[in-house]
Image (cartoon, rainbow, N blue to C red):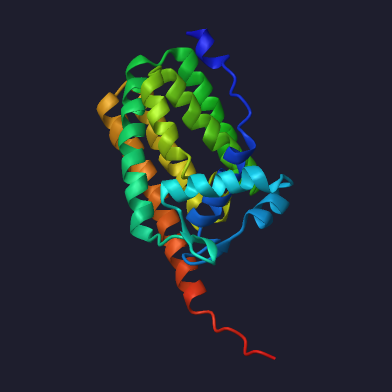
Amino acid sequence: MASRRTSTRARPQLSDEASGYVRGLIMSGELPPGAAVRAETIGAALGISTTPAREALQALRVEGFLELVPRRGFQVAVLTGQDVRDLFTVQALIAGELAARAAATATPDDLAELEALHHELIAAAARGNLELLEEKNHAFHREINLIADAPKIIWALGLMTRYVPRKFYPSILGWPEATVDDHAQLLAGIRSHDPRGTRVAMQAHVEHAGELLAAHFDARTSASQHVVPEPPD
């Protein structure tokens, strides 16, 4: 079992980094539907050449995040708050299964690690250190997934979480409070070895996060649609 915590993750390809960066901008509403996305701009923002940036945009086109418009280039495809909710609904189902398995198999050492991460998370929230809060939040969920010890399900979850803009969570209204409160429910289920209750708690937690992001996305999109363009000189 110890080996599951010693695995390392390979550094992502430059094109993967670029696609993740653009995907995050889209999912957070920073890039609204119809916005132009240029490989040169993305490359400059990340300090990479236009080749991996262009590869990233092509990949995002396949995923449905971008459209290639003749003579205009890549543009952000239509995305709604409901699309965001749907993505999180699927993620919640997968994460719920992993949480249920973790509750069934967690050892005292596993629980101690989760408790420690939760206390660190609470401390970060209390200090207003949102970057550290997100780091501990990610570590908390990763620990649950490792305890579940279900590589194929973890792989499937990874396909869904790639759409989640982690770096933007701290700026979403209500997210820090939701993280602290929801994690307490998850810990209670794992502590009592209650797979069913933990599954429900995890699904509710992920859907809660999805609702917060969807509301944030809707607000950003609505604001961008009501911006009055300045008259020409």
Total marks shown come to 0
Using the image, determine if residue 62 lies above or below residue 37.
Answer: above
- Observer-nearest residue: 36 or 190? 36
Please state the horizontal and vertical placement of residue 93, each as a whole percent of the image: 30, 36
- Observer-nearest residue: 218 or 76? 76
- Observer-nearest residue: 48 or 217? 48
Using the image, determine if residue 210 lies above or below residue 13.
Answer: below
Please state the horizontal and vertical placement of residue 71, each as a whole percent of the image: 54, 66
State the residue at coordinates (44%, 54%). Answer: 213
Residue lying furthest front: 71
- In the figure, residue 144 lies in which quadrant? top left
Residue lying furthest left: 196
Using the image, determine if residue 124 lies above or below residue 35.
Answer: above
State the residue at coordinates (57%, 38%). Answer: 16
State the residue at coordinates (59%, 33%). Answer: 120
**Image quarter of the C terminus:** bottom right
Please state the horizontal and vertical placement of residue 49, each as a whole percent of the image: 71, 45
